[in-house]
Amino acid sequence: MSFQFKAAMRTTITAASFAVAAIAATGTASAQQAPATPQGWFKICDKTDGSDVCSVRFIQTANTGQLITAVALVTVSGKINRKFMQVSVPPARLIPPGVLMQIDGSKGTKLDYGVCMPDLCIAELPLTDGIIANLKKGSEVVFTSVNFQRMPNPIKISLGGFTGVFDGPAMEQSKLAERQKLLQEEMQKKAGEARKKLEDAQNAAKQQ
């Protein structure tokens, strides 16, 4: 197995790490629900097989904690030099359309799916200097996937703060752990609220 393949798989899993807690929460929210978890672009860096791996990420989840979209711009430098973008979306996607990326209403760039698992599908695209420049000068980016009902699911993400995060230092491990803790707490809270709302509705129906 080549180093490139192993590194790609590791960064694929890492890019989705923050989405795992969201996916684990109960509920089946629509992909159009507003996010309720800690939001914003952030950057983390680590070492993998002697190479430096940095990724700029954005995680968006629904009120119940279900994954809506997870974006990762990954840079690998050292034994190999590689840049790529990954976009994770919920499962049950149509594979041929991939994920369409549009920056400020542009024509769009297609990301092909690299892997689909029971809880998410991940699309990937080589990360060029042109894409980075367009993201930096843009105000918003829209990622559109197509579900099994052949319905497009466009997700709009603000690019506010993207440039500062991309060009700035990585998040400290302590802050990263705190962010993940907040995410997990938020997921547990929303899952509890959703469960109570369902129980209240069931009790109300019994009393009618």
Image: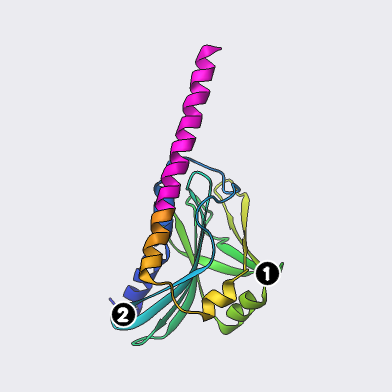
What span is in magenta?
Answer: 183-208
What residue occupies the far top of the structure in this picture? 208
Residue at which label 2 appears: 3
Quadrant location, the N terminus: bottom left
Q: Main secondary structure of the magenta part?
A: helix
Report the number of discs: 2
Residue at which label 1 appears: 139
**Distance between the alpha carbons at the discs numbered 2 and 1:** 36 Å
Above/below status of 84 relative to 194: below
Q: Is disc 2 in contact with disc 1, using a CB cutoff of under 8 Å?
A: no
Q: Is residue 117 visible?
A: no
In percent of width and height, residue 166 lies at 53, 77
* 206 part of magenta stretch: yes
In percent of width and height, residue 65 lies at 47, 47
What amino acid type is highlighted by mark number 2?
A: Phe
Residue positioned 53% across, 81% down in the render: 167
Residue positioned 56% across, 77% down in the render: 164
* Residue 9, image quadrant: bottom left
**As drawn, is 162 to the left or to the right of 104?**
left
